[in-house]
Image (spheres, grey):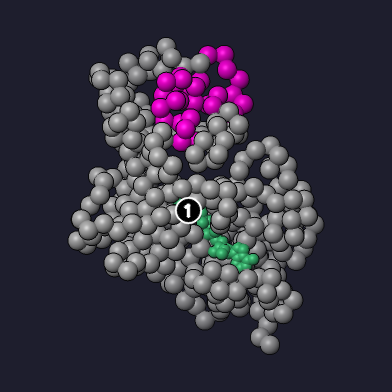
Amino acid sequence: MTSFDFLIVGAGFAGVTMAEQIATRLNRHVLVVDRRKHIAGNMYDGFNDAGILVHLYGPHIFHTNNKRVFDYITQYTEWRNYQHRVFAYVDGRFVQFPINLNTMQELLGRSFDPEQMNAYFESVRAKDVTVRNSRDVIVSKVGEELYNKFFKNYTKKQWNRYPDELDASVIARIPVRLNRDDRYFTDVYQGLPKYGYTRLFERMVSHPNIHLMLGVDYREIKGMVPYQKLIYTGPIDEYYDYRFGALPYRSLRFVHETIDQPFYQSVGVVNYPNDYEFTRITEMKRLTGQEHSKTTIVYEYPTDDGDPYYPVPTEESKERYRQYAGLAEQDDGVLFLGRLGTYKYYNMDQVIAQALSVFEKEIVTKYSHS
Ligand SMILES: Cc1cc2nc3c(=O)[nH]c(=O)nc-3n(C[C@H](O)[C@H](O)[C@H](O)COP(=O)(O)OP(=O)(O)OC[C@H]3O[C@@H](n4cnc5c(N)ncnc54)[C@H](O)[C@@H]3O)c2cc1C
């Protein structure tokens, strides 16, 4: 049986970045195994029956301020320039989100400049709040009214918990802008791979030292494939047979609908904080720029069952993760990486950055000469 230097579980950005580095820089052999039948992890995209390019696991927009990550990934793709814009459907109208001067004008029916918006927030925000949870973050910034319109029910749908039951970090990422910048992200580098994520991944794994085994669960080959080191980007609790209990995740059910008209909505994503059971609708062509007489939209319904997408950040789950991380620290045979391996909400650029840095710290030093 072939012997590999490394066995990598998971063909998402964590696993494939690591495989690419090991193959190209150390000239070592890697076997990448994924239980899905395809590479690219959650970034996987492909053409549907109507011939429209869709993201199978939710809309993915690449954005980063990290030049090193951007330069690294740019070796494998050209880019489509795309600045992501989101509307929220609130009080029967579509308004820009994140909240900015235009949003306030639309909602409150009078014009705002930065000073007036500041003064408004100052008059409505909850004062003397010790920020302990996501509700505290928002009401101490924008007050009850905007909290109720934009955040409270969206969060309940997304997490099945109200913001006061969730760690402050969950909503802390969402900015409020004292200008008219209506872009969802303001990172220096933004875009979508010109020919899709799957093509980008195909290029990353196209190296004679990288071997793929798709549609196979690690547990099916455990003990059968010899290797020196295991790199695991699947769920850490599953790896340790849930011995401290399962780490909670929130999942999504995606419902795709192809409509016989060129466009459905005017921006890539529309959030529905207060209406319907779905949280948002994505129109894929708005992201990819594809020209087609029809269009595909995707509804997202949050659920507890299904693929693990979002780690649920509560004190209890963090403590449980710490127990697993403790086991991992003492386990020399395996390295955990990625969103599932380290139980952390990471964007793509953060996962790539993590893989590049772990490669330098843990792999280059130990495996470049042996
Ligand atoms: C709905 C949604 C939208 C997102 N949008 C964005 C965005 O716009 N921009 C952005 O930067 N990030 C976005 N993200 C985050 C992005 O998806 C993650 O950063 C990325 O997927 C992390 O890569 P990964 O390699 O850690 O994990 P994954 O992509 O999940 O890859 C892990 C792989 O491991 C495999 N695996 C697990 N266990 C096993 C096993 N036992 N045996 C074999 N294989 C196994 C899985 O099948 C999976 O393919 C979004 C995430 C979601 C859920």
The residue shown at (50%, 36%) is 155
For residue 352, above or below residue 11: above
For residue 155, above or below residue 75: above
Asked whether the viewer can see residue 154, the reply is yes
Q: Using the image as rendered, state which of residue 324 and residue 179 is in the foreground.
A: 324
The span picked out in magenta is 127-155
Q: Is residue 142 magenta?
A: yes
| Residue 349 image position (x, y, % from top left) | 48, 53
| Residue 141 image position (x, y, % from top left) | 47, 22
Count of labels shown? Answer: 1
| Residue 307 image position (x, y, % from top left) | 56, 57
Quadrant holding the C terminus: bottom right
Quadrant holding the N terminus: bottom right
Main SS of the magenta part reads: helix
Q: Secondary structure at mark 1?
A: strand
Tell me the amino acid under the disc marked 1.
Answer: Arg
Task: Say few, some or many: other residues with alpha carbon within 10 Å of mark 1 (under 14 / 14 to 19 / 20 or more).
Answer: some
In screen coordinates, is 71 left or right of 297? right
Q: Choose top left, top right, bottom left or bottom right for residue 274.
A: top left
The residue shown at (63%, 50%) is 343
Q: Choose top left, top right, bottom left or bottom right for residue 122.
A: top left
In screen coordinates, is 334 left or right of 194? right
For residue 184, above or below residue 102: below
The residue shown at (47%, 16%) is 125
Q: Is residue 291 magenta?
A: no
Residue that label 1 marks: 253
Residue extending farthest to the front is 276
In screen coordinates, is 321 left or right of 10? right
